[in-house]
Amino acid sequence: MSDNVTAKAGVPVLGLAALGIVFGDIGTSPLYTFKIVLAQTGGKPDAMTILGSVSLILWTLIIVTTVKYVHFAMRVDNDGEGGILAVMSLLGVKKQNRPVIVAAGLFGAALMFGDGAITPAISVLSALEGVERVAPSLTPWVLCGAVAILVALFVLQPLGTTRIGKSFGPVMLIWFGVMAAMGIYGILQYPSVLVAINPYRGLEYLASTGLAGFLVLSGVFLCVTGAEALYADMGHFGPVPIRLAWNFVVFPSLALNYIGQAAIVLNDSPSDGSIFYRLCPPVLLTPLIVLATVATIIASQSIITGAFSMTRQAIQLGWMPRFNVRQTSAEGFGQIYVGAVNWLLMIATVALTIGFGKSDSIAAAYGIAVSMTMLMTSVLLFIAMREIWQLSIVTASAVAGLFLIVDSAFFAANMTKFFQGGYIPLAMAIAVYAIMWIWHRGSKAMHNSVQKTLIPTDTFLTELQTGMVARVPGTAVFLTRSAKGVPPVILWHVQLNRALQERVLVLRWSILSVPRVAETDRFTLAQEVPNFWRVEARYGFMEMPDVPKLLASCRAADGGIDLTDVTYYVGRTSIIPREDGQGLPSWQREPFAAMSRNSARMSDYLKVPNDRLVEIGRQIPV
């Protein structure tokens, strides 16, 4: 986000908005994290276990979220954008053959889609499980209520969140304030719990319990499951508002609440069920359940919006087939809707909710996806330290090594839950990764095949000038991704129609490894012969092309371009096997062909008016 936007909105205002968009996931983790940690210790924890567990939670928040993400990773940005795909792009994977960076970035991104399905399920279930304390007779209806809320959340996505989105920040501010007050209430009942702030308590617990203590780390990790999403959302607000919101609102509230939960357990409160709701006086329990449910809905909305944004980035960078991406608000660039992703996430989320039934059970499937994503991010951060910051190998290894050790420990602990449901997000990630990898391979093979059929521009222009091609009134705009030669779509048009319009404009667009391109650098325009122009348009991976808008800018730059009678031409390809048998293997070609057939129309992607569009089909061997 630019400094101008930050200045206009004001850092405090952006910080308030960030509470609703950035911190929803990590801000609702106290609903379930501590109870799951204590359940993993055996269900009857002693004082050392309770203090050690909460100490581990506090220092995990400090090391992973505060140090690694808020004050370190957010300094590695791609023109203000964060997240694993933005860093992957920053490191120049489009210009160099760097399989380690590509694999780390893409698989980390694929894992985030698994997180997008699990977060709404565990969050909403955890909030509604507080009903068990108010009205135990309603316990059987908790699952039904969670499913109803989740279905409604996804069904309403096409409408956007412009109107209600403005209330997300204030609601989450109330939520964090309530959590802090609850934590203070618990601490006042057992003040000696504050000794857990000493990291020695956590280390002592791990050292004295051995393997059992190590396995508890899988539950401890749940306290930072929203940290990666925090990094990915950096471009919406900028690093300063996010850091302020975390340091002065979010982290203090989380720390107080976790310590308060430990305090009431030390004060002989039961450790089974929801410890979070036991911090609340009975008379206020119902309003708290309502507030918690709203907070988890906001957290779920943030995760869904993040999945949409990541899909758009992957499409722009050429790693996913085109989906219909619809802007739901003129006010916010991040307000988009991707129908295919929305419905697939809904199916996965509802299936997980029904299949596991309780938040404790879903937790087994939760940590693996996020811990592996964090591991991938640490690998990319190490490379960024060496190549961007120019740090020595010793310094980079020392800093990144700390992150890798912590991330590896959490990942190893979470892998012990593989057969308890941990395989689900991994299976989802592998499926998404396969889609991205096959699409990229197929696109590259198709591009290479088309390049072999190109003829030199000079040859074709000579034919135009010698009158070998009949000319008819109007302006033809040919859309292509070819960087040189005459675009295939022009040749197909001339071969089929034996004619060409008087004015021809060849438009090529490219997606750069930056989030956005300045309007002054948007395009270059060159007239190669009279009435024949070539336009090179450039977009960032966070932008969507708009051809009519671009042509209006071209018309302003060159008054000879007539847009009163325009026809757009775009190629529609069908994938077939190469006759020499040297193309893609069938297990790659057939899925790529299916994705190509079912991807969104290029004209929709480029916002070309359908009533002025001609699609020309051709078979391309790959």
Image: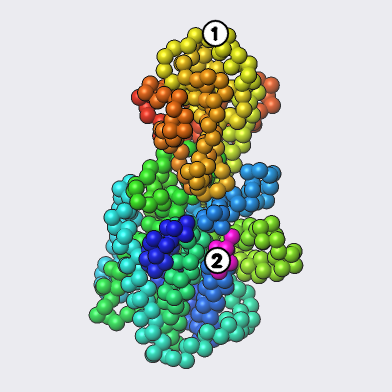
- Residue nearest the viewer, comparing 423 with 198: 198
Q: Secondary structure at mark 2?
A: helix
Q: Is residue 6 above or below residue 158?
A: below
Q: Position of residue 184 (x, y in %)?
A: 39, 84
State the residue position of label 1. 467
How crowded pointer 2 is (Cα within 10 Å; few <14, some 14-19, many 20+) is rated as many
Q: Which residues are magenta?
A: 71-76
Q: Nearer the viewer, mark 2 or mark 1?
A: 1
Disc 2 + disc 1, Cβ < 8 Å: no
Q: Position of residue 435 (x, y in %)?
A: 55, 41
Residue at image point 48% right, 69% down: 243
User: Is residue 490 shown to the viewer in this render?
Assistant: no
From the viewer's perspective, tell me whether residue 390 is left or right of residue 197.
right
| Residue 615 in which image quadrant | top left
Q: Is residue 75 magenta?
A: yes
Which quadrant does the C terminus fall into? Answer: top right
State the residue position of label 2. 69
Q: Amino acid at mark 1?
A: Gly
